[in-house]
Image (tube, rainbow, N blue to C red):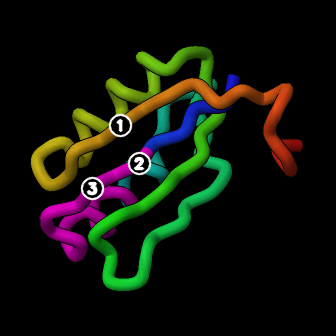
């Protein structure tokens, strides 16, 4: 399944340093397909592929929960564009 995450970031420098390390060491079966930071770094939209929303939520909250509020949601893949 595809999972979208909207990150509202309090400390962009710390967030992106942690995110880079996290993405390099993801659990098996979880991948990041796209990372789309806003100019200035206060918001970031990411597209993940994982077995569940909860699996992504756990990874992002554990990794960057101290510097960002993370909203995770299932993508309606049948209505999306460019997912494969």
The image position of residue 23, as x and y in percent, is: 47, 51
Counting every numbered tag in the picture gives 3
The quarter holding residue 78 reads top right
Between 64 and 22, the residue placed more toward the observer is 64
Residue 29 locus on image (x, y percent): 62, 25
Return the residue at label 1. 71
Instruction: Please tell me which residue is depicted at 22% across the width and 76% down the height of the picture.
Output: 13
Say which mark, if any, is on residue 8.
Answer: 3
Q: Secondary structure at mark 3?
A: strand
Marks 2 & 3, CB-CB < 8 Å contact: yes
Residue 16 in which image quadrant: bottom left
Residue at the spot x=85%, y=47% of the render? 81
Give the Cα distance between marks 2 and 3.
7 Å
- Image position of 14 (left or right of 44): left
Q: Position of residue 50 (x, y in %)?
A: 61, 25
- Region in magenta: 6-20
Tell me what residue is drawn at x 42 percent, y 32 percent.
72
Residue 9 percent across, percent down from the top left: 23, 61
Tell me the crowding category of disc 1: few under 14, some 14 to 19, or many 20 or more residues within 10 angstroms, Cα based. some
Query: Are dots 2 and 1 in contact, CB under 8 Å?
Result: yes
Label 1 close to label 3 by CB (< 8 Å): yes
Q: Nearer the viewer, residue 31 or 80?
A: 80
Residue that carries the numbered disc 2 in the rendered image: 6
| Element at label 1 | strand
């Amino acid at each position: 399944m595809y999972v979208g995450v909207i990150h509202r970031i309090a400390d962009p420098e710390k967030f992106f340093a942690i995110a880079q390390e996290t993405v390099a060491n993801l659990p098996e079966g979880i991948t990041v397909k796209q990372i789309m930071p806003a100019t200035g770094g206060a918001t970031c939209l990411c597209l993940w592929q994982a077995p569940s929303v909860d699996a992504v939520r756990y990874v992002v909250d554990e990794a960057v929960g101290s510097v960002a509020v993370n909203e995770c949601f299932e993508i309606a893949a049948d209505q999306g564009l460019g997912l494969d």
